[in-house]
Image: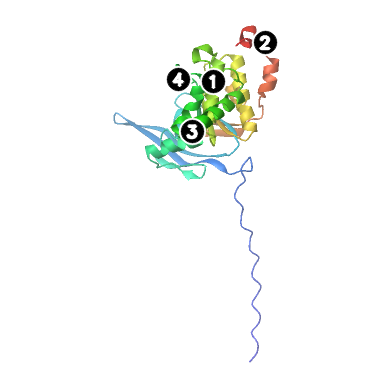
Amino acid sequence: MEPRPAPPPSPPQAPASAPAATPTGGPWLIEMRGLHKTYFMEGIDVKALKGVDLTIAAGEFTCIMGASGSGKSTMMNILGCLDRPTKGQFILAGQDVSTLTNDELAEVRNKRIGFVFQGFNLLTRTSALENVEMPMVYAGVPAADRHRRALAALAAVGLAGREHHYSNQLSGGQQQRVAIARALVNEPSLILADEPTGNLDSRSSVEIMGIFQDLNAKGITVVLITHEPDISRFARRRILLKDGRIINDAPITDRLDAAEELANLPRDPEHDEE
């Protein structure tokens, strides 16, 4: 019996494709997949988001822009776990939060997200220190640890020595610094800033953006919601929404550096005394 011929060699296998690298080299912090949000109002369906696909890596500084009615407020509410999508997935730090209960969403907000709002949202009858301690009260952090972490957060935003001042003793820029410190104390995965300079003068606005740039340089992820093109230029990436869809998503090539901008602004003696 003649020996059988050897089988032909198997064709070379194509190497498995590696997952797409994130801009920062780290994991995706935010993944939105086919995201829709529809509001049902008096028998009318209002489609605020229409199939949004979005990824943001840990360590990015991203700006979301859009005119009134574009969907950016809805996007912010979903990013902040203040609302759920009607359809699609929202994955935050590896966890699908699309279908969590209200209590579960509240826990995610407290542990993973720090909020900074246009109106500061400070308690007027409490000191800066007490305002910053508030998220840790809800998280059950012991009093001594709360005090230590709140002092460190206030120092990090340039308010050492102002810990016991009340809101009416602080300028708008200083109140926003307190709000940023409050957002930082639980060491969140994400800082979500909604129009954070909307109530501030030009110099205070640049100072606040400088704080966000410094935090981002330390590896903190920042997502900024704004309608101001100049403010968006302090971020690294700009996402433009229109009619519930992303119409542009690109790196910012003319990025502003807050330290340089401050150096070029004229000094204001009244501002310096604040």
Camera-side residue of 224 and 153: 153
Q: CA distance from mark 3 to mark 4?
A: 21 Å
Label 3: few (<14), some or many (≥20) within 10 Å?
few
Image spot of residue 227 (x, y percent): 53, 23
Mark closest to the chain's N terminus, 4 or 2: 4
Q: Which residue is mark 3?
A: 142
Q: CA distance from mark 4 to mark 2?
A: 31 Å
The C terminus: image quadrant? top right
Q: Which residue is mark 4?
A: 123
Q: Report the disc number at residue 267.
A: 2
Query: At label 3, which amino acid type do we have?
Result: Pro
Mark closest to the chain's N terminus, 4 or 1: 4
Residue at (64%, 84%) from the top-left corner? 4
Image spot of residue 163 (x, y percent): 55, 19
Image spot of residue 19 (x, y percent): 59, 50
Mark closest to the chain's N terminus, 1 or 3: 3
Q: Nearer the viewer, mark 4 or mark 2?
A: 4
Q: Is residue 227 left or right of residue 69?
A: right
Q: Nearer the viewer, mark 1 or mark 2?
A: 1
Q: CA distance from mark 2 to mark 3?
A: 42 Å
Q: Secondary structure at mark 4?
A: loop
Residue at (42%, 35%) from the top-left corner? 106
Query: At label 1, which amino acid type do we have?
Result: Gln
Q: Are marks 2 and 3 in contact (CB under 8 Å)?
A: no
